[in-house]
Image: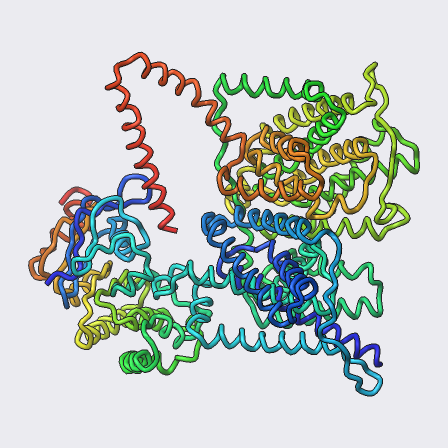
């Protein structure tokens, strides 16, 4: 069943549109990875869904209800959480306050969720009194994801979760995201540069090239030449003399 | 000993009040990255409301204060919703609008309650006697309320969801908004809450001090001093800084010299912004956020037709006083012309550096006072006084600039304002030279030169207008020098300019001194037009008119400041206003211009005039053609403009 549906989306920063006539859908309970080269429009896609950017054309629907142009805080209430690129942990708040800020709802319910997060992210429980700025990059990424899950979103948007992470941490992140999938019925739309990470988590893959979706389908139906195309804009050059 | 303890109790009371003022400044800055200049005036307004309710309507004190706080909070809500919200993240425009609101509130209070100080009927009376120490009950009430509010506020910020939201959106509004914080609403609530605290301080202050409508500027300076020393955004720091300032002022009054006590906060503000802009407890980032300048887009090129119209206006300027006829009209024209010279100086410095200078008002005062002194003591005439005043203004600017040009953006603006107030305080206190509060009177005229006589207002106007034309030519030439190009490059990208080996601060200092020379000219002209100078003419608030003229007329344009000076100069004449209502009109003008014509009058007129021949032609064309052809043009236009507008809103969303 389609949870999030994007149709004919056109959006840009004033000049030529970054995304043009873009279609994509996210089914309930699935993990969709959107891959593409730098500047292909992946982050713009997430920013538009979460209300930071206003589309010039097209629709974004959550279970049939149009959500395009809503402010991020309203969207969160509607069930769309966005883990921003670069994590953006608030250093003037403690780890626990960072988590609490992400929660919607009151009292016992919030305390339950906090306990749940501490179950999954044991590090965060240990560090909960520290300022968010004192965490390592990996811990901050866990906090950013945990913070977004405190709102119990139906859709989780993940922008480059592996960016700037050591390979060991990426492994751990993959394990954790897998566990989160088992625990919650959150659907995930992730944008990722680390292809193996994306492919090991995702059910389906979308490939973006020059602001258009050039492939969409199950992970196993993706072949490598397509990836090469999307990342390098043509066949991969193996030597200077040609392919 | 008992004097010391009693003084300390007074100091504690004052500290509590200062804290309540500063905490609003500090938390509002955290949310909006902006400084509310009207903050202190809201305090005064609440104090006067309390006085009105208690003395004139016989309400009991506590309900009177609550009512005053509610009314002021409502006003803050309206100000936020109608003005600040519409200006968005343009900190510069918002700052100027709050300045406009200050002027409006101040003169509004004068209109309602008159200009004199009002003393609340004693409501909390008597004192406790402990040994030989007297403790006034009113002071105890104030200290207890302030302490309770401090604890309450701290708990609110640290423990509640609202507090977390406030702290989160102060640090990173985008991240906060993705965590469900309605950032704009939180900012609005903080603005209203912070202003309500100032109002409460006003209600409390009425217990022990008489309050006059003109105290708003005084209190906001205290608020700034405390908030900046603590570091913007730091509430506990503000508590400590308030204690330091309150104590040192009361001790200074008791053991030192009362007339220099205001200097404490001036020195604190200038010192902290120059040496340690993040304060003692603040985030570094808050200081940089305050340092950002704002430069409006350039004025479009003049088309031939536009040039003709402007040249005609300038030519008309010479005959203006002849045209308006009356004696009063000619005098006003003289003031407008000499104000225009000063506005040219502020405008040039703004175009070269991107910094809006409130301190050129001080150099203007230096020029005027230097002229007055040389005239009174040495009997010098206009033409010898003029170069002397130019040099004096430039020397003072060089020294002052060497210190304060380390700051930029809002910091510079604030430092300039405070430095001007500092100069006014010097003028009041240095009686042997300046004649104290009553100033210096010089009834002289420039006499005759090369067969031209300059005696009556019409001739004076023509002299000043000629000086203005010389100043304009000079400004026009300076803007085309390589020196100006280097400065403007640094204005647009200071890091790049430094990395290319530009001595940015030295260049700025030279431009500062150069433009101060023009201020000196205008200052001397003012002396000869007004026949006297007094410190009250040269305070920060009194000289706000100059940057205002620049913004109103169009800061990026050569003629903008001139237009601004004439419009503002003529407002009192056209509407037959006294000095108070003039200030009211300035406030209204400031608010309207920032909302409707943020680029100023001249650029807007240039745009209209440039387009006028084309529009005229198009109109004639449509008249000639069949009615069917009419609909085509607007449709094409509409599509194009529509597309552009959408692009812009997308851009804004990104930020």
Q: Can you tell which quarter of the image residue B627 is in?
A: top left
In the current view of this chain or complex, which residue is farthest to the bottom? B131
Residue B372 vs residue A206, the one in the foreground: B372
Taking the view exactly as shown, the residue that stands out farthest to the right is B378
Across and down, in percent, residue A156 comes to 24, 65
Asked whether A136 or B312 is in front, the reply is B312
Question: Is B351 located above or below residue A166 in the figure?
Answer: above
The residue at the far front in this view is B57
Lateral position of residue B34 relative to residue B565, left or right = left
Query: Is residue A237 visible in the rendered structure shown here?
Result: no
At which x and y percent is residue B140? 70, 78
Residue B178 as seen in the image, left or right of residue B118:
left
* Residue at left offset 28%, top offset 13%: B625
Whether residue B357 appears in this view of the structure is: yes
Give the percent coordinates (x, y) of residue B475: 64, 29
Looking at this view, name the residue that lies furthest to the top: B624
Q: Position of residue A225 (x, y in %)?
A: 11, 51
Compared with B151, B307 (above or below) is above
Q: How are the colours assigned in the image?
A: rainbow
The residue lying at 47 percent from left, 28 percent from top is: B300
- The image shows residue A146, relative to residue B82, as above or below, that is below
A12 vs B366, left or right, is left
Residue B632, image quadrant: top left
Residue drawn at 84 percent across, 32 percent down: B385
Residue in view at x 32 percent, y 17 percent: B622
Give the total of numbered labels.
Answer: 0
Where the N terminus of chain B falls, by quadrant?
bottom right
């Amino acid at each position: 069943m389609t949870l999030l549906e994007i149709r004919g989306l056109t959006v840009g920063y004033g000049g030529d549109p970054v995304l043009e006539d873009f279609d994509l859908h996210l089914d309930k309970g699935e993990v969709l990875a959107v891959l593409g080269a730098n500047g292909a429009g992946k982050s713009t896609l997430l920013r538009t869904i979460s209300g930071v950017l206003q589309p010039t054309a097209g629709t974004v629907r959550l279970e049939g209800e149009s959500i395009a142009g809503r402010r991020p805080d309203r969207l969160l209430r509607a069930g769309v959480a966005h883990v921003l690129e670069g994590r953006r942990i608030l250093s003037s708040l403690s780890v626990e306050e960072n988590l609490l800020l992400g929660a919607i709802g009151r009292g016992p319910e919030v305390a339950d969720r906090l306990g749940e997060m501490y179950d999954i992210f044991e590090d965060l429980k240990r560090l909960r009194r520290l300022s968010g700025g004192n965490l390592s990059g990996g811990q901050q990424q866990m906090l950013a994801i945990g913070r977004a899950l405190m709102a119990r979103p139906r859709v989780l948007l993940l922008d480059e979760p592996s960016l700037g992470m050591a390979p060991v941490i990426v492994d751990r992140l993959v394990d954790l995201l897998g566990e989160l999938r088992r625990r919650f019925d959150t659907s995930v739309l992730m944008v990722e540069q680390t292809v193996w990470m994306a492919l090991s988590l995702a059910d389906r893959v979308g490939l973006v090239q020059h602001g258009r979706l050039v492939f969409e389908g199950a992970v196993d139906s993706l072949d490598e030449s397509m990836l090469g195309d999307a990342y390098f804009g043509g066949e991969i050059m193996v030597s200077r003399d040609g392919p | 000993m008992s004097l010391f303890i009693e003084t300390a109790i007074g100091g504690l009371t004052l500290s509590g009040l200062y804290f309540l003022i500063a905490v609003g400044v500090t938390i509002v800055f955290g949310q909006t990255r902006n400084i509310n200049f009207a903050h202190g005036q809201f305090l005064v307004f609440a104090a006067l409301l309390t006085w009105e309710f208690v003395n004139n309507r016989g309400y009991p004190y506590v309900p009177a204060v609550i009512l005053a706080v509610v009314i002021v909070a409502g006003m803050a809500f309206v100000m936020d919703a109608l003005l600040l919200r519409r200006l968005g993240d343009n900190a510069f425009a918002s700052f100027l609008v709050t300045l406009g609101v200050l002027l409006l509130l101040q003169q509004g209070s004068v209109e309602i309650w008159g200009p004199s100080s009002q003393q609340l009927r004693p409501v909390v009376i008597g004192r406790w006697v402990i040994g030989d120490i007297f403790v006034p009950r009113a002071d105890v009430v104030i200290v207890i309320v302030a302490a309770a509010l401090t604890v309450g506020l701290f708990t609110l910020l640290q423990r509640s969801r609202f507090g977390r939201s406030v702290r989160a959106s102060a640090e990173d509004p985008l991240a906060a908004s993705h965590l469900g914080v309605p950032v704009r609403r939180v900012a609005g609530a903080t603005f209203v809450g912070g202003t309500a605290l100032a109002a409460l301080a006003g209600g409390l202050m009425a217990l022990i001090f008489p309050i006059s409508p003109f105290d708003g500027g005084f209190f906001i300076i205290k608020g700034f001093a405390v908030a900046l020393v603590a570091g913007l955004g730091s509430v506990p720091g503000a508590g400590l800084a308030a204690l330091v300032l309150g104590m040192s002022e009361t001790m200074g009054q008791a053991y030192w010299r009362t007339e220099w006590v205001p200097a404490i906060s001036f020195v604190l503000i200038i010192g902290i912004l120059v040496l340690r802009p993040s304060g003692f407890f603040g985030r570094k980032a808050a200081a940089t956020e305050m340092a950002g300048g704002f430069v409006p887009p350039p004025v479009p090129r003049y088309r031939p037709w536009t040039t003709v119209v402007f040249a005609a206006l300038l030519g008309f300027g010479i005959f203006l006083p002849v045209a308006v006829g009356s004696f009063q009209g000619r005098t006003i024209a003289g003031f407008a012309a000499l104000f225009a010279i000063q506005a040219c100086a502020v405008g040039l410095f703004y175009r070269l550096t991107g910094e809006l200078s409130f301190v050129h008002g001080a150099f203007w005062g230096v020029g005027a006072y230097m002229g007055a002194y040389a005239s009174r003591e040495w009997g010098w005439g206009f033409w010898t006084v003029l170069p002397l005043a130019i040099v004096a203004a430039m020397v003072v600017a060089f020294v002052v600039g060497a210190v304060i040009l380390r700051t930029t953006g809002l910091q510079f603006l604030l430092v300039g304002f405070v430095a001007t107030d500092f100069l006014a305080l010097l003028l009041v206190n240095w009686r042997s030279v300046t004649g104290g509060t009553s100033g210096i009177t010089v009834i002289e005229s420039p006499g005759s030169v090369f067969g031209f006589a300059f005696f009556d207002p019409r001739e004076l106007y023509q002299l000043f207008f000629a000086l203005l034309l010389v100043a304009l030519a000079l400004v026009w030439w300076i803007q085309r020098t390589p020196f100006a190009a280097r400065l403007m490059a640094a204005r647009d990208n200071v890091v790049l300019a430094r990395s290319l080996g530009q001595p940015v601060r030295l260049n700025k200092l030279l431009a500062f001194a150069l433009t101060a020379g023009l201020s000196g000219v205008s200052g001397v002209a003012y002396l000869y037009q007004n026949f006297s100078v007094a410190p009250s003419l040269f305070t920060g608030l009194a000289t706000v008119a100059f940057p205002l003229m620049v913004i109103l007329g169009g800061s990026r344009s050569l003629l903008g400041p001139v237009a601004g000076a004439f419009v503002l100069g003529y407002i009192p004449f056209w509407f037959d206003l006294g000095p108070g209502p003039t200030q009211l009109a300035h406030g209204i003008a400031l608010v309207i211009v920032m909302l409707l014509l943020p680029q100023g009058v001249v650029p807007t007129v240039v745009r209209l005039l440039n387009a006028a021949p084309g529009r005229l032609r198009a109109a004639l064309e449509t008249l000639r053609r069949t009615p069917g052809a009419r609909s085509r043009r607007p449709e094409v236009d509409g599509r194009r403009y529509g597309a552009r507008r959408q692009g812009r809103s997308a851009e804004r969303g990104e930020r």
